[in-house]
Amino acid sequence: MAEVAALEHVEPASPGGPEVAGRSPWALAGRRLLRNRFAIGGLILLLVIIAISFAAPLYADHVAHTNPFENNLNGHTIVNGKRVALMQQGGGILHLGETPLGPTWDVHHYFLGADQNGRDVASRVLYGGRSSLEVGIGSALICCIIATVLALLAGFNGGLIDVVLSRLMDVIWAFPVILLAICVATVLLNAPDGVGVGPVRITATSLWLPTLIIAFIYLPYVYRPVRGQVLSVSEKEFVEAAIAQGASGSRLLFSEVLPNVITVVIVLFPLMIATTILTEATLSFLSIGVQPPNASWGTVISDGQQLLYTRPWVAIAPGILIVLTVLALNLLGDGVRDALDPRARLRIEG
């Protein structure tokens, strides 16, 4: 009987142990994310790429001492202590015409060589990364914000609003992504006075144009999963309890529904950045994305397309950076998903 009495006085242990008890879900998610080596490795790699890309002006002005946006067909540089022309006569397989200087592997003198216009490839790759990251992150951010707002309005209110918004998203969804982007970009780039509403005008050379185009074409890809989550959360018991207590619509939306939906958007955000960067590179490669004088990874690859047999690093260098950036974002996105919803991994593995 004494043993039974002792057992009755034993308090049940916390399900997560002393380290978990009393912590907020966000703190627990952050702790799980920090323990994910692949996600942290992807985050570090992404930060390194962002840092070197946004340091492009410092590299061009103080290290390479070049202007990557001006043609330099008659220029020279130093290779192994000798003065060498940037455009070399008799290049290629047939030794005809001119071939740009190849990589010198000297950070001070055309590290990755020159392109067909005598411009420093290394500087253009860094500037291109800057533009690609700005467009990719900006378009993903705009897309996620607008799609989340529309999904909240449609899923929470239902009725005519839900029908109209969902059918509009279905129309956008029906078009192939690249084909729709090409059509919209072609129309907007050919506008004589640019695109604008009222006093705000966006010219063809502005980075805002590809940013808004890419954000528009990916709206359904964020809207649909977020709307589904809103519909699911709206039927939960805690929402019904809040309604029974007389909570207003705005309080239900921002205090009950949105906090339980925002995790889906957070998981989608790094994956959307990877997708938008690939889309921007595709459009820029086709000359309907980032416009001169700006450069992007896609435009640099396009510049090196005709130099693949003689100076392949013009196209290989930005291609490697695109692969590394997308890989880092996917690793980070998977880590964020596992941290915010650890049961998802158990369901997949089970």
Image: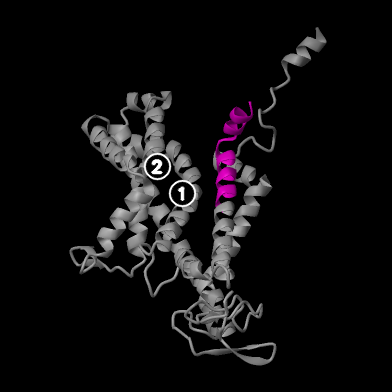
Q: Is residue 330 toward the left or the right of residue 258 in the image? A: right
Q: Position of residue 43 (x, y in %)?
A: 60, 55
Question: Hey, what amino acid is under mark 1?
Answer: Met
Q: What residue would you read off at disc 2?
A: 221
Range covered by the magenta-colored residues: 329-350
The answer, for residue 275, to whether it is visible in the render is yes
Do labels 1 and 2 touch, CB within 8 Å? yes
Which residue does the image show at 38% across and 65% down from the upper left?
A: 287
Q: Which part of the image, by quadrant, shows the N terminus?
A: top right
Q: Tell whether position 343 is magenta.
A: yes
Which residue does the image show at 38% across and 50% down from the upper left?
A: 178
Q: What residue would you read off at disc 1?
A: 272
Q: Position of residue 317 (x, y in %)?
A: 58, 66
Q: Position of residue 247 (x, y in %)?
A: 32, 31
Q: Is residue 198 toward the left or the right of residue 306 in the image? A: left
**Residue 100 in the image: above or below residue 296:** below
Which residue occupies the foreground of this view, 31 or 148? Answer: 148
Which residue occupies the foreground of this view, 201 or 29? Answer: 201
In three-dimensional space, the C-alpha distance between marks 1 and 2, rounded to whole angstroms, equals 9 Å
For label 1, the SS is: helix
Q: Which part of the image, by quadrant, shows the C terminus?
A: top right
Q: Is residue 247 toward the left or the right of residue 319 in the image? A: left
Q: Looking at the rendered structure, which numbered label has been put on residue 146?
A: none
Disc 1 crowd, CA 10 A, few/some/many (<14, 14-19, 20+): many
**Residue 93 in the image: above or below residue 161:** below
Which residue does the image show at 34% across and 50% down from the upper left?
A: 179
